[in-house]
Image (cartoon, rainbow, N blue to C red):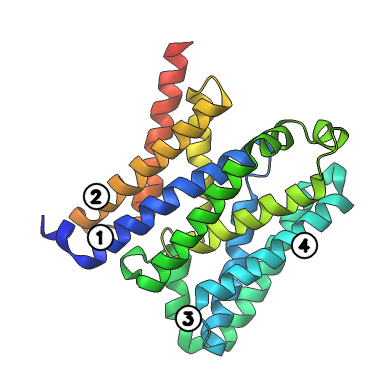
Amino acid sequence: MDLLTAEFFQRALLGGALIAITAPLMGLFLVLRRLAMIGDTLSHVSIAGVALGFLINVYPVAMGLVFAIIASFAIEALRRTYRTFAELSIAIIMAGGVALASILFTLGKGYNLDVTSYLFGSIYTLNNSDLIVIAIVTVVVLGVIMLLRKELFLLTFDEDAAAVSGLPVKFFNILISILTALVISASIKIVGALLVSALLTIPAACGLALSKSFRQAIAIVVVIGEAAVLAGLWMAGFWNLAPGGTIVLLLIVILLGSLVVRRYKV
């Protein structure tokens, strides 16, 4: 009970609960569009931004967001260039992000410990500024999805049909990339850059295994995301474990359970 009344743990629960809504939602769109690895790419680029933020004494999450948005534009440009090999754009940007981060790590040796916390997550160190950023990202992402849900649905399942129907496909592709960048930048302090893609993809995998419709999948990914984050935080706090790793391992356990349920349902 002492843990639940601790202010740092309450901030962690609030931040985790908000990200557990947006990350699985964006992950579902990415998985259905076969862009699941974009989470890894943008998170690695975000770490380069975080490192630069420490170097120049600017709010690290903000710099990570700027880098992630720039990377999302670059990915979309390369996707159009290599339409037949769309995954190539993800590999190129990831390589560039890792290379830049390594150089910035070398330049900022005194800040490496702080940057490392963003690699593996440091949800217990969330402050009020972090919570405000996470809340703003949550409102923006949910607002856009609710407002443009029909267009995003069509684009997700048939991009060619969306283009034929007059939908500005280029704009929506960039919009999805930017929303993903927002979510990832807000998530890296919670589960860490190395694990953030799990929060995007594993709930989506569970939703696709258990759902019979897209609307049902949306509900399932959010419920699973919330359950894994909140239960993972409690377990990590109770047994003194790494929060990010605990959340991801719990997600994997839930995925295995989902696959078992799906097998016996069929």
- Mark 3 highlights which residue? 112
Residue drawn where x is 46% and y is 32% of the image: 219
Residue 98 visible within the image: no
- Mark 4 highlights which residue? 74
- Picture quadrant of residue 113: bottom left
Task: Give the amino acid type for the residue marked by disc 1 in the picture.
Answer: Gln
Q: CA distance from mark 3 to mark 1?
A: 27 Å
Residue drawn where x is 55% and y is 49% of the image: 143
Can you tell which of label 3 and label 4 is closer to the viewer?
Answer: 4
Judged left or right of residue 131, residue 104 is right
First in sequence: mark 3 vs mark 4: 4
Residue drawn where x is 60% and y is 64% of the image: 44
- The numbered mark at residue 235 is 2
Q: CA distance from mark 1 to mark 2?
A: 14 Å
Which element type, helix, strand or loop, lies under badge 3?
helix
First in sequence: mark 1 vs mark 2: 1
